[in-house]
Image: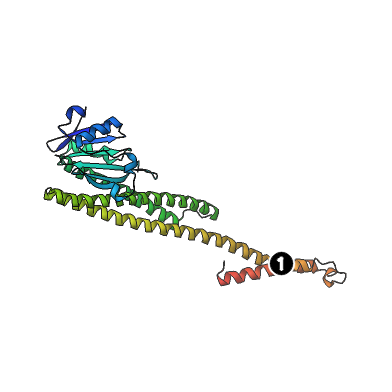
Amino acid sequence: MIKAFVAENDRLRAVDGFAANQERVVWADLFSPTKEEETAVAEWIGVTIPSLEAMEEIEISSRLYTENGAYIMTATLPAHADGDRPKMSPVTFVLAGTRLATVRYHEPRAFQTFPLRAEKADTGCSNGETVLIGLLEAIVDRLADVLERASGEVVTISHDIFHPSEKKASKRDRDFQLVLRRIGRKEDLVSKIQDSLLTLQRLSGFLANATIQHKISKDLRSRIKTLSRDILSLSDHASFQTQKINFLLDATLGMINIEQNAIIKIVSVAAVVFLPPTLVASVYGMNFALMPELQWFFGYPFALMMMVISAVLPFWFFRRKGWL
């Protein structure tokens, strides 16, 4: 599918029929294109449209290059990032003079929100260059929103770890298992955002060098520099979140070990407390003929008292030492 946009009074307007409006189109957005659509846009922009296999190459030379004076740039962007399992897929931006073509096979949020905003407000979209920069700014804003949401959820996880609401150890153990899953999902989300920011950082550097050669206006060069700084700051923030997530993972495992050690300590203390009464009962359970206490009137109460005292004394000693 081809979504075509023309520039009118520094705003974008979607038009039907790419072939009929080729001369006025400044941005052609290809979504899961067919071979015929790729060929039509390639003839319009003057360069070959890369295939999905070529877009998925990890070499920088395959993602950032020039061809016939056009700049072909590929970045990995998330879609459906409102949850913890975003779909990651490459998106290619082809800038040839005043024309822009984008190739994608999924639906990043910025490709929905930016055209609507550029149609309603004066965003300075007069040609392919300004559309590209505005689109990249919308993408970075979207990644910032995703990171901000993830940061808030990480704070919530931290509170659940260090301030558990459950008092019973068994329920806390189940909660910690759920926390581990939440931490794993947040780590996966943040790592994917980091990968996306890395590709955007390379793209912005390549675009900055291209603008120097292309001699675009100072305003656009300033916006690209600002975009690069925003991407760098988001990368630093994502790195900080990764470190915090790793800390929370270690803290959760530590809390689980503390809970397990507490249970083992209780079992060990119970075994020690009941060991002396068991010894007393074992002594008086022997079947020897000559045992003076067997004929003693107070023998049975005396044995019970000895068992109670031998259980209370270790318990009192452990409490005095602070082991319980």
Please, is residue 244 above or below residue 283 in the view? above
Tell me the quarter of the picture where residue 53 sits: top left
Residue 167 coordinates in the image, percent (x, y): 51, 55
Can residue 11 be seen at all in this image of the molecule?
yes
Q: Residue at x 20, y 45 (%)?
A: 133
Viewer-proximal residue, 168 or 194?
A: 194
Residue 194 coordinates in the image, percent (x, y): 33, 52
Tell me the quarter of the picture where residue 297 sits: bottom right
Residue ranking furthest to the front: 68
Residue 6 coordinates in the image, percent (x, y): 17, 34
Side of 315 relative to 108 (left or right): right
Q: Secondary structure at mark 1?
A: helix
Please, is residue 255 above or below residue 6 in the view? below
Side of 247 relative to 324 (left or right): left
Side of 150 relative to 9 (left or right): right
Please, is residue 298 above or below residue 31 in the view? below
Residue highlighted by disc 1: 277
